[in-house]
Image (spheres, helix red, strand yellow):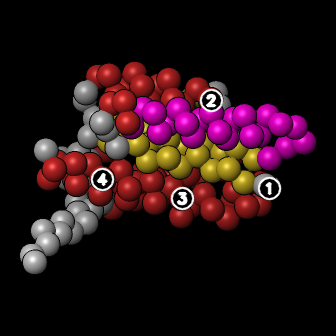
């Protein structure tokens, strides 16, 4: 049997990427943003092909992603944010609902959405993860956009 395997393609040249970043937990979100944008550039995505918008918190991210998906101008979208556990149930609500919303945008619109909304117990955990998660989001967006182009 011959299997038609498609190799991962991390060449971002020509791709248009939309990024939505939460401003809540700003230092972590800015760390995610900086790592993500640097990785997109390293993968060959041109600066003029990246759109970056900010929202107040993680719960607002899915709505903006949805509007971006509706435009059909982007090959992939990226969600950046940080939800850090506090003393109330609000952590679970924000984590679960923002995650479900991000996933729904991808499935409803058939567009890759890299979810880099960190959900951590502490600020320190978020700070340790922000750089690698920001880079991962860029790689996921580019690789999945390229895979969908092959499938189409």
Residue 144's disc number: 4
15 in magenta: no
C-beta proximity under 8 Å, tags 2 and 3? no
Q: Secondary structure at mark 1?
A: loop
Q: Is residue 17 visible?
A: no
Distance of mark 2 from mark 1, alpha carbons?
19 Å
Q: Mark 2, residues whose alpha carbon is within 10 Å: few (<14), some, or many (≥20)?
A: many
Q: Earlier in the sequence, mark 2 or mark 3?
A: 2
Q: In this rendering, is residue 26 above or below 135?
A: above
Q: Which residues are magenta?
A: 85-106
Distance of mark 3 from mark 4, alpha carbons?
16 Å
**In the picture provided, is 148 more to the left or to the right than 142?**
left
- Image location (x, y in percent) of residue 71: 29, 22
Q: Is residue 43 visible?
A: yes
Residue placed under numbered mark 1 in the picture = 122
C-beta proximity under 8 Å, tags 1 and 3? no
């Amino acid at each position: 049997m011959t299997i038609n395997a498609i190799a991962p393609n991390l060449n971002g040249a020509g791709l248009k990427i939309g990024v939505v970043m939460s401003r809540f937990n700003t230092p972590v979100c800015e760390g995610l943003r900086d790592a993500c944008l640097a990785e997109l550039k390293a993968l060959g995505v041109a600066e003029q092909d990246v759109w970056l918008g900010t929202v107040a918190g993680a719960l607002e991210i899915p709505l903006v992603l949805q509007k971006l998906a509706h435009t059909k101008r982007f090959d992939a979208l990226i969600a950046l944010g940080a939800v850090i556990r506090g003393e109330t149930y609000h952590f679970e609500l924000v984590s679960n609902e923002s995650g479900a919303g991000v996933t729904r945008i991808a499935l409803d619109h058939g567009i890759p959405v890299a979810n880099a909304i960190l959900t951590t117990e502490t600020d320190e955990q978020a700070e340790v993860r922000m750089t690698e998660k920001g880079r991962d989001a860029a790689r996921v967006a580019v690789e999945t956009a390229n895979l969908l182009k092959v499938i189409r």
